[in-house]
Amino acid sequence: MKTYAFNVALLSIFEEDQVVYREDLKRCYYVLEKGYNSMAINLPDTLFNKSMKARNEIARILAEIISTRRQMKPDCNDLLQSFMSDKEGLTDEQIADNIIGVIFAARDTTASALTWIIKYLGENPSVLQAITEEQEAIMRGKEEQKLSWEATKKMPITSMVIQKTLRVASILSFTFREAVEDVEYEGYLIPKGWKVLPLFRNIHHSPEIFPDPEKFNPSRFQVAYGG
């Protein structure tokens, strides 16, 4: 799933450019991935040192792609072209940071979500059958090979399965936020500057919010899709 999500991310970011640069980007990103959580000791041959070198190499490759795009001005409709638009007003360094962030999300959380979806579909044949029929119906009604944004709006069962998977598996267990001002919540004072750590897994598996929380029941989200 990591390999699949990585390749799809490159395709959505670069469209045609990814064919030429895919292997170099993949090689550098894998090195970066191994070292991004390592001890920040920038000595030769440490994971952190190798990771920083790989990050610089990715930035160089991206700069080359961006420069080529600006010279050739191709008719592209991908994420990179969106980042490069005058409307966004991003510097080349900011564009590179955003692209690396998208790749990271694909290799990490997206790949994890896809893995859990496959697991739950394998354990629930009736749901798998329903989602298969929905996808096949969309394919039969499409004139083009590419998936359109409009087509994704015709996938209520698929969307419910995704929502259910994200709830049960809780891909992100928690996150950090900082109070930018004093906040009072249910009688408790959260002073400005304090860190807040919401535990999504506790919320997603609370029987007070989701009755029978361990049950994989996508129809639970049917109300949100007009059912």
Image (tube, rainbow, N blue to C red):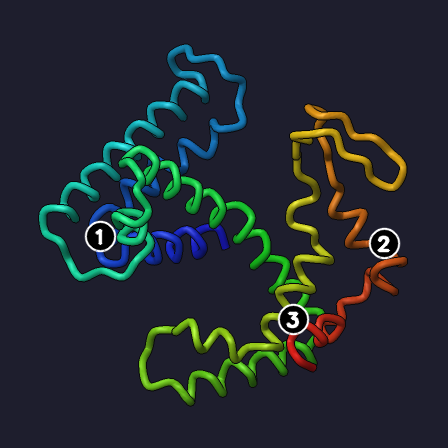
**Considering the numbered disc 1 on the image, is that residue within a helix, a strand or a loop?**
helix
Q: Residue at x 22, y 52 (%)?
A: 17
Task: Describe residue 157's horizontal placement relative to residue 198 as left or right.
Answer: left
**Above or below for 151 versus 216:** below
Task: Describe residue 36's horizontal placement relative to residue 168 as left or right.
Answer: left
The residue tagged 1 is: 17
Residue farthest top in this picture: 43
Circle nearer the N terminus (1, 3): 1
**Above or below for 120 versus 84:** below
Per the model, the C-alpha gap separating discs 1 and 3 is 34 Å
Amino acid bearing label 3: Met
Q: Position of residue 39 (x, y in %)?
A: 54, 18
Q: Nearer the viewer, residue 132 or 173?
A: 173
**Above or below for 221 versus 92:** below
The residue tagged 2 is: 206
Circle nearer the N terminus (2, 1): 1
The residue tagged 3 is: 160
Amino acid bearing label 2: Ser
Circle nearer the N terminus (3, 2): 3
Q: Nearer the viewer, residue 114 or 13?
A: 13
Badge 3 crowding class, 10 Å Cα cut-off, few under 14, some 14 to 19, many 20 or more, is many
Task: Describe residue 27's horizontal placement relative to residue 71 as left or right.
Answer: right
